[in-house]
Amino acid sequence: MRQINIQLNAVFNYAVKYYDLAKNPTKAVDTIGKRQKRQAFGSLEEFSKVIAQVDKPELKLAYLLLFYSGMRIGELLALSPADFDFTAGTINISKSVMMSTGKVTTPKTPYSVRVVSMPPALMKEVQDYINHFMEPPERIFTYSQKVYRDYLKRYAIKAGVPPIHVHDLRHSHASYLIHNNVPVTTISRRLGHANASVTLSVYSHMYEESAGDVAVMLEKAFICGQNVVTEGK
């Protein structure tokens, strides 16, 4: 039901943009169906176990970028060397590959256009990988989405980790940031969401899971405060 609702919404959005439909009628009602909770790697350690099994350089680099950037697979496949600023340590995400046609297009929303900061060591790996080519490639990643998907499942099983979808690496990235107390506004911009409300709606269960961390934090603050009072006496 949810997938039908999503497709219907897309059809009406297309009609609004290209066929002068006054408004999208699906916007007037709530979303049909429930969002399924997607599996995500529970920890960086589990992801590291999977990466240790990857024996193809292009696949390894792709999975690392997906996990540490939170970008979508279509955005990854559209990347060219020019999208990387190795001095600033950032990736400019401004286009995506349509899975149905393989063509490079602009993102579906303006919020998807963003600049994402990356770990310097990973950026160095990207630079080294690009430098291996005789000439800079038009697009860095050449495999189809199916290849990335099938190999990831294979590597996960080999590592003793439950099979996972490529898109779940994006959820894993969000989960890692949430559990490391990164502000939701920062996560929202990094994922290319329209606003923080979208991020909260998608990852609300993760915030609920981390609620216990607040009690631990406050307990430490309380004990620290009591010690200060005692010492003051």
Image: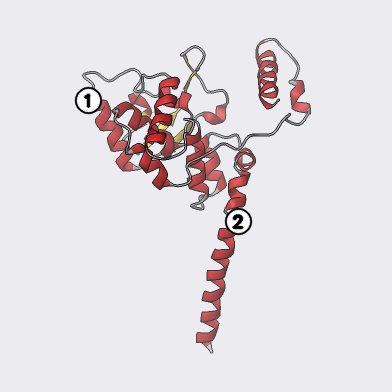
Q: Which residue is at 37% across, 35% downward?
A: 158
In which quadrant of the rendered image does the N terminus lie? top right
Q: Residue furthest bottom?
A: 233
> What numbered label is drawn on residue 211?
2
Please state if 222 lies on the left or on the right of 78 as rendered.
right
Q: Is residue 87 visible?
A: no
Location of mark 1 (residue): 132
**Distance between the alpha carbons at the discs numbered 2 and 1:** 46 Å
Q: Which residue is at 31% across, 35% downward?
A: 86
Q: Nearer the viewer, residue 129 or 41?
A: 41
Q: Nearer the viewer, residue 78 or 155?
A: 155
The image position of residue 16, as x and y in percent, is 69, 16
Q: Residue furthest top?
A: 19
The image position of residue 33, as x and y in percent, is 72, 30
The image position of residue 200, as x and y in percent, is 62, 43
Taking 27 as reference, is 232 above or below it?
below
Q: Name the amino acid, label 2.
A: Ala
- First in sequence, mark 2 or 1: give its number: 1
Residue 123: quarter of image: top left
Taking 88 as reference, is 20 above or below it?
above
Q: Name the amino acid, label 1.
A: His
Please state if 125 lies on the left or on the right of 91 as rendered.
left
Secondary structure of the residue carrying numbered label 1: loop
Taking 156 as reference, is 208 above or below it?
below
Q: Which residue is at 37% across, 30% downward?
A: 62
Secondary structure of the residue carrying numbered label 2: helix
Q: Is residue 105 visible?
A: yes
2 vs 1, front mark:
2
Please state if 187 lies on the left or on the right of 161 as rendered.
right
